[in-house]
């Protein structure tokens, strides 16, 4: 379990391993669902993606694994940025 410290400005800084686990980077958004008994659930907010930044579709999601074209096309299709008919 990771423990976080709240600053005097009511802010927190997430450790690198937490950000990697959530699959988020600087500028990304995180959804917080407040649960009963003082608990909360964090998850990466779904990105709408950008056709101007296609390299960002897979950033932080491959663990430095090389992907085949089909895997890349499937990842792009999951972003709903381009219609399927224009995929590679």
Image (cartoon, rainbow, N blue to C red):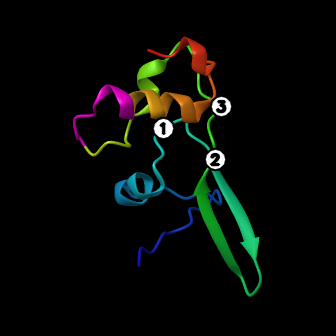
Q: Nearer the viewer, mark 1 or mark 3?
A: 3
User: Which span is picked out in magenta?
Assistant: 64-71
Q: Is residue 61 magenta?
A: no
Query: Do the numbered discs 1 and 3 sit on residues whose CB atoms are within 8 Å?
Result: no
Which residue corresponds to mark 3? 48
Toward the bottom, the furthest residue is 37
Tell me which residue sits at (37%, 30%) in the image.
70
| Residue 5 appears left or right of 39 | left
Callout count: 3
Q: Sequence-wise, which precedes: disc 1 or disc 2?
A: 1
Please tell me whether residue 22 is drawn above or below residue 6 in the rendered image: above
The CA distance from mark 1 to mark 3 is: 16 Å
Binning the other alpha carbons within 10 Å of mark 1 as few (below 14), some (14 to 19) or many (20 upward) gives few
Relative to the observer, which residue lies in front, 12 or 46?
46
Binning the other alpha carbons within 10 Å of mark 2 as few (below 14), some (14 to 19) or many (20 upward) gives some
Helix, strand or loop at mark 1:
loop
Q: Position of residue 34 (x, y in %)?
A: 75, 70
Which residue corresponds to mark 2? 45
The CA distance from mark 3 to mark 2 is: 9 Å
Please tell me whether residue 16 is drawn above or below residue 6 in the rendered image: above
Q: Sequence-wise, which precedes: disc 1 or disc 3?
A: 1
In the picture, which quadrant includes the N terminus? bottom left
Helix, strand or loop at mark 3:
loop
Please tell me whether residue 53 is drawn above or below residue 45 in the rendered image: above
- Which label belongs to residue 26? 1
């Amino acid at each position: 379990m990771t423990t976080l410290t709240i600053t005097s400005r009511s802010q927190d800084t997430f450790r690198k391993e937490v950000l990697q686990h959530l699959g988020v980077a600087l500028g990304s958004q995180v959804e917080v669902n407040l649960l009963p008994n003082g608990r909360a659930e964090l998850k990466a907010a779904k990105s709408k993606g950008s056709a101007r930044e296609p390299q960002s579709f897979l950033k932080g999601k491959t663990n430095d694994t090389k992907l085949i074209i089909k895997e890349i096309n499937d990842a792009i299709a999951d972003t709903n940025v381009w219609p399927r008919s224009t995929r590679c």
